[in-house]
Image (cartoon, rainbow, N blue to C red):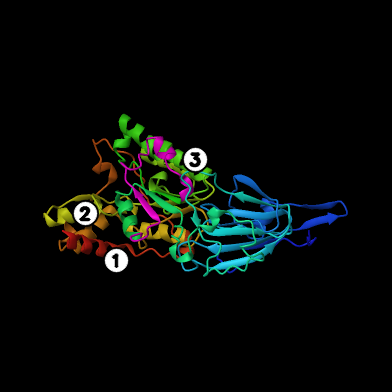
Amino acid sequence: MRVEFQKKLVGEATSIPGVVVYDVPVFGDNRGWFKENWQREKMLAVGLPDFCPVQNNISFNDKLGTTRGIHAEPWDKYVSVATGRIFGAWVDLREGPSFGAVFTAELDASKAIFIPRGVANSYQTLEDNTSYVYLVNDHWSPDAEYTFLNLADETANIPWPIPLVEAEVSEKDLGHPRLPDVTPMAPRKTLVLGADGQLGRALRRAYDGDNSVEFASRDEFDLLDPRSYSDRHWGNYRTIINAAAYTAVDRAESQPGRQAAWAINSTAVGRLARVAAQHHLTLVHISTDYVFDGLNTEHSEEEPVSPLGVYGQSKAAGDAVVSTVPRHYIVRTSWVIGDGNNFVRTMASLAGRGVRPAVVDDQVGRLSFAADIAEGIRHLLATDAAFGIYNLSNEGSPQSWAEIAADVFELSGADRSVVSGVSTAEYFKDKAAAPRPLNSVLALGKIKATGFQPRDSKSALMEYLSASEATV
């Protein structure tokens, strides 16, 4: 066997996106040779994805010319040679512009290759007694879906060193379809939970037409049912967006409300976090300004949480669990406005009916329109922003609820001066209500540094009211 010793560990991109060939250092003398076949820290340093392998397989081939493939598998794969030499052929069978791209190379013990999910691989041995080893990042499952290509496909036109008529080939591999008849492998899916809530509906619009995004309502994915977490083949997913939450702030202070808030905002989130960690998924979780006590004039992502009520406490607990997931985004919002019942719609209704409301004037913050939250989430995922916590509200000068109500009245054609102010203490006097942070302003510098610019709050309010009027 010809093996080149003392190579430096480096990676070289190929003509197929995501497929990278690595030179692997091999150390040898008159006794034989040694190599670190898989060394996570060193390989991450030269750009190999941290694909978290869970299974190590060996393929042993007796004869020169043994040919296997062309198979695209629903997991990532890292292949290296243990003994002998192989000719490898890889064909991109993923949906997208690189579908059908071909790359070939000869591998010996001093080379390895990383193959992303959906790229088909095939190997022809160039020596007797050849073995190659591959690491994969998912366990075999009867639900796993493969995609195949015929070894003799004319479009791929693979230059087999040993003609297929002379090679050891299985009848099954010779029976696979030609490229025009291949159904491309779909990408891993994104699962949106709470898809019928204000944010869930905004995410439906943001991802409209994207078949890789799956939406689940409460009936379709019951956060409180353990079977929801065990009945899915999570290897088919890449991301979970958790837009579900218990948000009845005042009811959460009651005994049944307290149980429900903790069950949905903490216990269920813990189950999602476990799934995400075990299956190497990205978990996007929606947080709230209620995790703060409101004493600071502006809340950064680094501020320690200090929730005042049960709702905020249960959300802070959920955030803490999500932060342990290696791939996570905690998107912290305030004063969410979307489809359905909300403060802006209530004020617009009062304006239309000539009501003169008294509105709280000592709570200050910014509105967060669900459409902008959805676009912010899309941006974080699409740009592979650094994992962590991101504040996300609309831009603009902070306002009190009373000031926002006056804006709604004015934009609805009513007199803004009929809105009067009242303190939080006065408004909730003799009422069973949760404590509220008086300052909910979120610092937006971190998410803006990723290239995302939230819309101005007043402009967004005008568009929202115009759209609401058009749908009445």
Quarter holding residue 441: bottom left
Whether residue 78 sits left or right of residue 467 in the image: it is right
Query: In the image, which disc is placed on residue 363?
Result: none
Disc 3 element: helix
Report which residue position mark 1 lands on. 459
CA gap, disc 2 to disc 1? 16 Å
- Residue with the mark numbered 3: 274
Instruction: Look at the picture and state if 432 lies above or below 20.
Output: above
N-terminal label among 2 and 1? 2
Q: As shown in the figure, which amino acid type bears the numbered disc 2?
A: Arg
Which amino acid type is marked by label 1?
Ser
Q: Tags 2 and 1 in contact by the CB under 8 Å rule? A: no
Residue extending farthest to the right is 30
Q: Secondary structure at mark 2?
A: helix
Residue of label 2 = 345
Residue type at tag 3: Arg
Quarter of the image holding residue 224?
top left
- Residue 386 pos. (x, y %): 53, 57
Disc 3 versus disc 2: nearer the observer:
3
Q: Nearer the viewer, residue 163 or 30?
A: 163
In the rendering, at what x and y percent does residue 38 appear? Answer: 69, 51
Q: Which range is magenta?
A: 207-236
Q: Quadrant of the N terminus?
A: bottom right
